[in-house]
Amino acid sequence: MTSVHRDLDLRPREAAIDEAGHPLHLLSEEELRAHVAEVLERARRRSAGLTDAVDDADLVKQHSTLMSPLVWDLAHVGSQEEIWLVRDVGGRDPLRPDIDDLYDAFQHPRSTRPELPLLGPEEARRYVTEVRAKAMDVLERAALRGRDLTCHAFAFGMVAQHEQQHDETMLATHQLRRGDPVLHAPAPPPAVVHDLPEEVVVPAGPFAMGTSIEPWALDNEQPVHEVFVDTFALDTIPVTNGRYTEFVDDGGYTDPRWWSAAGWAYRSAHGITAPRFWRREDGQWWRIRFGVYEPVPPDEPVVHVSYYEAEAFAAWAGKRLPTEAEWEKAARYDPATGRSRRYPWGDDDPTSEHANLGQRHLRPAPVGAYPRGASPLGVHQLIGDVWEWTSSDFHPYPGFVAFPYREYSEVFFGSEYKVLRGGSFGSDAVAVRGTFRNWDFPLRRQIFAGFRCARDVRGGDAGV
Ligand SMILES: [Fe+2]
């Protein structure tokens, strides 16, 4: 019996979501249904915006072998929604069992998808609309407190996150697309705080990593577990274009001292000399962003760099990349209470005051634009703007259980992938949390990824 109390005493202290008013816990079942409907509708508005912005020829075209045709992503979103919500949760008859294979991401690599007999643009639009109508009918009738898959409407949250993740992928396809600009959005807010300290020191100690109570957390974020993190210093802000240009102009791309063996081999094989979409003209760096050609803005976080480039920059700067445990502690740990928050600013869902999320803007915001989103330790812009590469491989947490299927995370665990944290301007709030883990190959550059640096702090060196 004493072990129960001991377990309770030692249990990592996680955000008290109920006390903080997390909506999924406090909402009545009817309110939860309305919340789910709103989140699904938001995802669909975005999918429609991304696919209606171009003509049918552009929708079926492959803009890069790294990406699917946009029309594949659209019907794939519908196919997954049909499988999980209509068939599994709803127990309804399949609408289109004949296309399951076409839209199974594991059956067909992206480069081969244009050759498949895909649904055309009109057919795909009709299909996702029909699926959504049935899914909404299922939502009205489903019990949301029963089995794991429907508890707190998890399956609906998973499907909404999935659609938003594909929306971010489609946004990356738009970035790779050549032609006139078709996407438009207001500029992000300007910087309102300046002269932030370069680094924040995070004191040594344990913290609660991951979650066991966040209702829509995915399997790889679970369970909560205690991790001891030694004292380290983390950059207050992500590395900016201005700072990154210093590395480029200092010959960073041609000096093997800064690169890992794998990074140098990659750099040499591909002949890269700057972040993707950058070009040097008349002694100045320019970039193409969603069809707009513009000078590289020095105060924005650098984006479209691979893990290898991030690693090389950090070495050049006399630093290193943070581990994902370091990143999460800096983002969530509250020294005043000893517990981990849902987000750097607290337990409330993100608003436009906290972070640059949800494709409200088509670019990262300048550093210093979101003081209300800072963590208790004073680290800025951890959520939104750019995904941040960490030095960690993608591994399961102790006690990991695959849910609802192995292919969500488990088949990707290993040293092939690096973990990214925090989401980008192209990530929706439903698909980002302080615990959320993204992963990708270290050579990826088309994703909206940047980074910040960390360094070890030895005893007596903490007064940065
Ligand atoms: Fe998918």
Image: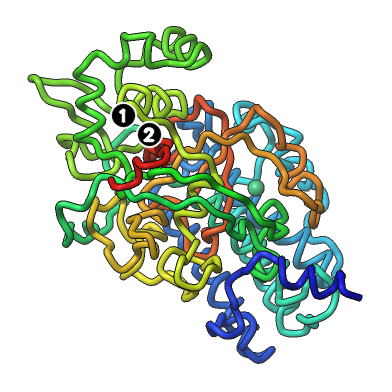
Labelled disc at residue 277: 1
**Label 2's element?**
loop
**Residue picked out by circle 2:** 304
173 in relation to 4, above or below = above
From the top left corner, tell me how far across and down residue 452 is, in percent.
37, 40
Q: Is residue 158 above or below residue 136?
A: above
> Residue drawn at (69%, 40%), measured in percent from left and top?
395
Quarter of the image for residue 352 reads: bottom left
**319 or 25, nearer to the observer:** 319
How many numbered discs sit on the rendered protein? 2
The residue sitting at the left extreme is: 282
Mark 1 and mark 2: Cα distance apart in space: 8 Å
Question: Of the residues shown, which amino acid type is indicated by label 2?
Answer: His
Label 1's element? Answer: loop
Q: How is the image coloured?
A: rainbow
Rate crowding at label 2 as few (under 14), some (14 to 19) or many (20 or more) other CA atoms within 10 Å.
many
Which amino acid does the dot numbered 1 rest on? Phe
Task: Report the side of 376 relative to 208 (left or right).
Answer: left
